[in-house]
């Protein structure tokens, strides 16, 4: 995909593209949008999409990968992927097993710890004991090791991001796949549509304080035109992050480390950035508290910036047609986001 199309976020009936890649060309260190804003005020500039290669391609339902074309924008096409998460997981498993990874399936019955609090091993329901020097917790929202065992604590952001539920399903694709995700704002949340080659992924993210699960499901199904391929599935979540992503000899990744929401497809990105940071700070002969502190500080800054980026979609709306959107328009923002918005208005 080359971007995300947002519908009904600013106002009902409004659309805009968050297209990937560069917008225009910067001049002498001054970002392009400064020039664009000045010329737009004089009615001498086209719509912003006219200066973004990915946006132009999205409007025409075109796609290509970057090529070696010298100074041409074709050398720097930025794109992401829509993929079947189940098939991708199977691919990664096969890839890992052929490279010596040992795959053991079992439920953790007991976590054993040393006197210093470090985890020494996991007792599985098969009576197998898995010993280790370092543990990566990928156990999802429950945080089997990082929270249930090490009890690092959780910072709740639901007062800023009130959506706490999602209903998902898959349906037949009734049109040629387009190179973008659709994000459609609803009365108490938003709906995604993600085309693959063989099906369409659908989901409705919503705030249960403002809409019932039955109403959210009806809203989702009303916008699906192809035959359903799966039953609907309800997912509950609490936005926020662990107070420590890495504690003692345990590092949390993915949902175990926290969750914002899937509005800008940032979850897998954060998994990858977490892995890369671990590699950069990888403990050698011993686990260093300096490494742990640096990792946690970097992840904190990244997660808070993503939180502000997601929250920005909600607070700059002009919608007042439902209690949910009135709440979003009037909520108290984090100081970091408030500062950024005021800075943009000033400059």
Image (cartoon, grey):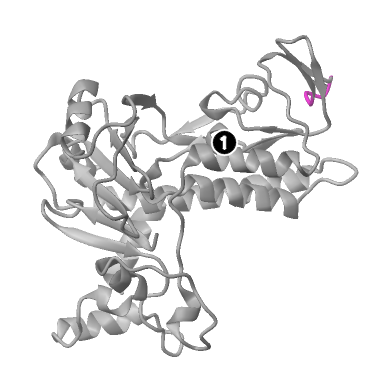
Vertical placement of residue 170 versus 62, above or below: above
User: How far from the left and from the top, in percent, is residue 188?
Assistant: 20, 35
Residue at position x 26%, y 78% in the image? 50
Q: Nearer the viewer, residue 98 or 285?
A: 98
Q: How many marks?
A: 1
Q: Nearer the viewer, residue 236 or 174?
A: 174
Vertical placement of residue 156 versus 96, above or below: above
Q: Mark 1 highlights which residue?
A: 257
Query: Is residue 210 at least partly visible in the picture?
Result: no
> Is 211 on the left or on the right of 126, as rendered?
left
The N terminus appears in which quarter of the rendering?
bottom left
Q: Nearer the viewer, residue 80 or 138?
A: 80
Vertical placement of residue 106 versus 302, above or below: above
Q: Secondary structure at mark 1?
A: loop
The C terminus appears in which quarter of the rendering?
bottom left
Residue at position x 25%, y 68% in the image? 59
Residue at position x 24%, y 46% in the image? 174
Which image quadrant is residue 153 in?
top right
User: How far from the left and from the top, in percent, is residue 126?
Assistant: 74, 10
Q: Was residue 7 drawn as part of the magenta stretch in this picture?
A: no
Query: Is residue 35 at least partly visible in the picture?
Result: yes
Residue at position x 39%, y 43% in the image? 262
Tell me which secondary structure the magenta stretch mostly adopts.
Answer: loop
User: How far from the left and from the top, in percent, is residue 4?
Assistant: 33, 57
- Which residue ends up furthest to the left in the rendered image? 321
> Is 22 on the left or on the right of 49, as rendered?
right
Provide the residue span drawn in magenta.
115-119
Q: Nearer the viewer, residue 102 or 26?
A: 102
Which image quadrant is residue 227 in?
top left
């Amino acid at each position: 995909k080359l971007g995300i199309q947002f519908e009904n976020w600013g106002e009902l009936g409004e659309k805009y593209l968050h297209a990937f890649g560069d917008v225009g060309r910067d001049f002498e260190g001054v970002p392009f949008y400064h020039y664009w804003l000045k010329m737009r005020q004089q009615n001498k500039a086209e719509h912003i999409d006219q200066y973004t290669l990915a946006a132009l391609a999205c409007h025409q339902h075109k796609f290509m990968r970057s090529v070696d074309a010298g100074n041409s924008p074709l050398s720097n096409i930025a794109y992401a992927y829509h993929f079947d998460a189940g098939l991708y997981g199977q691919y990664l498993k096969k890839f890992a097993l052929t490279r010596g990874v040992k795959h053991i399936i079992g439920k953790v019955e007991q976590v054993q710890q040393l006197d210093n609090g470090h985890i020494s091993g996991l007792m599985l329901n098969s009576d197998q004991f898995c010993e280790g020097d370092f543990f990566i917790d990928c156990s999802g929202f429950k945080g089997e090791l990082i929270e249930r065992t090490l009890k690092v604590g959780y910072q709740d952001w639901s007062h800023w991001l009130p959506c706490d539920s999602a209903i998902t399903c898959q349906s037949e694709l009734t049109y040629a796949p387009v190179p973008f995700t659709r994000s459609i704002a609803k009365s108490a949340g938003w709906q995604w549509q993600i085309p693959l080659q063989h099906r369409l992924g659908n989901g409705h993210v919503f705030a249960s304080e403002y809409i019932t699960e039955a109403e959210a499901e009806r809203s989702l199904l009303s916008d699906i035109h192809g035959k359903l391929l799966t039953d609907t599935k309800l997912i509950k979540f609490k936005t926020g992050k662990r107070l420590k992503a890495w504690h003692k000899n345990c590092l949390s990744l993915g949902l175990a480390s926290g969750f914002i929401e899937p509005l800008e497809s940032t979850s897998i990105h954060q998994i990858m950035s977490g892995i890369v940071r671990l590699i950069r700070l990888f403990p050698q002969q011993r686990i260093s508290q300096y490494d742990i502190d640096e990792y946690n500080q970097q992840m904190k800054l990244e997660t808070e910036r993503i939180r502000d980026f997601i929250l920005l979609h909600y607070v700059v709306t002009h919608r007042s047609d439902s209690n949910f959107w009135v709440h979003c328009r009037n909520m108290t923002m984090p100081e970091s986001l408030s500062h950024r918005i005021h800075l943009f208005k000033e400059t």
